Amino acid sequence: MQRRYSLKALAAVATLAGLSALPAHAQETIKVGILHSLSGTMAISETVLKDTVLMAIDEINAKGGVLGKKLEPVVVDPASNWPLFAEKTKQLLGQDKVSVIFGCWTSVSRKSVLPVVEEMNGLLFYPVQYEGEELSKNVFYTGAAPNQQAIPAVDYLMSKDGGSAKRWVLLGTDYVYPRTTNKILRAYLKSKGVKDSDIDEKYTPFGHSDYQTIVADIKKFSQGGKTAVVSTINGDSNVPFYKELGNAGLKAKDVPVVAFSVGEEELRGVDTKPLVGHLAAWNYFQSIKSPDNTAFIKKWSDYAKAKGIAGHKDKPLTNDPMEATYIGINMWKQAVEKAKSTDVDKVIAAMAGQTFKAPSGIVSKMDEKNHHLHKSVFIGEIKADGQFNVVWKTPGPVKAKPWSPYIEGNDKKKDEPEKK
């Protein structure tokens, strides 16, 4: 009897010990994965997105969290190493058991992550403009598709207000986003009567730093008629490119450059005075006047100072992917609350049609079917202080077309992810 009681007691103690070995926070928090490059060529753009997610998590937690639980961030550094993005995703989903991932900038990193989130049924919110040609049930795209950025930018440059460009230099970093975007733009330009001989396509590797020859070539090409440059250069290569534009005296009135991956953050390390008048196309600029944007900038400024975030604690800047990140995490929170669960399939269903008053002052809506936001498009001119003056915008939000009509065969594709 005594021995049997002792065994029972030991078993009970062992069970309790086993339970206490489980992390106390396992059932009390909801884990959120943050998958952005904090080192390497893309750190210049991605580090601030990690901080944006952390700010939003602090804000949500201060208001009671989600479903009565605090959000717990799990930050990893894929270090601008594309295969490492896949490895870190496996770690976040398999080991850390995160409910959602906010991450990636380049399309090559997203393409690396995609098969992992699909196989493990994870959830990725991707906050950057991209080339389209993709739909996944496991991804929500809060950045722009080509018809929400690239096509409107080219239309503007062709217009009288934009300088009536007749010749085009398509200049990008050598990977899937620039090449696919330029494939779409080449077909679009040809549909508008532009000849192949009036389109020059150039690519440089990630981390490229010598743009002297390329800028000289652009100057030479522009002698054949009114020329515009469409830049899909990504990462820290933007700094030497813009410096070389300034050195060569290539002014916006002569050859305007419109960039799709340059915002307030990328211009931080550049003397912007020679760049005045060059352009960027986004769905948000810090300079947009709205009470919502004023509040967002103040929120970020206070957070950056409190956390001592490098650069931002002295000169806080906001940009489009920060806004897209902020919209994404708030929509995810709303969807979890609607689903009353962090179960991925339930959250995906609850995301359809979600709306959120964005910092731009516009109500962002997640499309009911195609996992993309309806977004307004803004074109801004660089000012001497590194901010942008909005010179053109769409009358209202534009629905994304993930499958570009300028790529053959896309007319047969469905505007929603395949159910797998």
Image (spheres, rainbow, N blue to C red):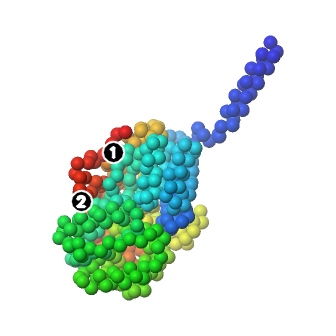
Residue 245, numbered circle:
none
- Residue beneath disc 2: 406
Quarter of the image with the N terminus is top right
Q: Residue visible at 27% across and 79% down?
A: 227
Q: Nearer the viewer, residue 113 or 267?
A: 113
Q: Are marks 1 and 2 in contact (CB under 8 Å)?
A: no
Q: Nearer the viewer, residue 150 or 203?
A: 203
Question: Image check: 306 left or right of 334?
Answer: right
Residue with the most extreme front position: 197
Q: Nearer the viewer, residue 27 or 220?
A: 220
Nearer-N-terminus badge (1/2) = 2
User: Is residue 325 visible to us here?
Assistant: no
Q: Residue visible at 37% across and 47% down?
A: 136
Alpha-carbon span between mark 1 and mark 2: 20 Å
Where residue 172 sits: x, y (%)?
38, 70
Q: Secondary structure at mark 2?
A: loop
Question: Image check: 411 left or right of 10?
Answer: left
- Residue beneath disc 1: 417
Q: Quadrant of residue 11?
A: top right
Where residue 348 sits: x, y (%)?
40, 42
Question: Image check: 62 left or right of 378?
Answer: right
Give the residue type that dot 1 points to. Pro
Disc 1 residue crowd, few under 14, some 14–19, many 20+, Cα 10 Å: some
Quarter of the image with the C terminus is top left
Is residue 104 depicted above or below 282 in this figure?
A: above
Q: Residue visible at 39% across and 50% down?
A: 140
Disc 2 residue crowd, few under 14, some 14–19, many 20+, Cα 10 Å: some
Residue with the most extreme top position: 1
Callout in the foreground (1, 2): 2
Where residue 19 sits: x, y (%)?
67, 33
Give the residue type that dot 2 points to. Tyr
Q: Quadrant of residue 96?
A: top right
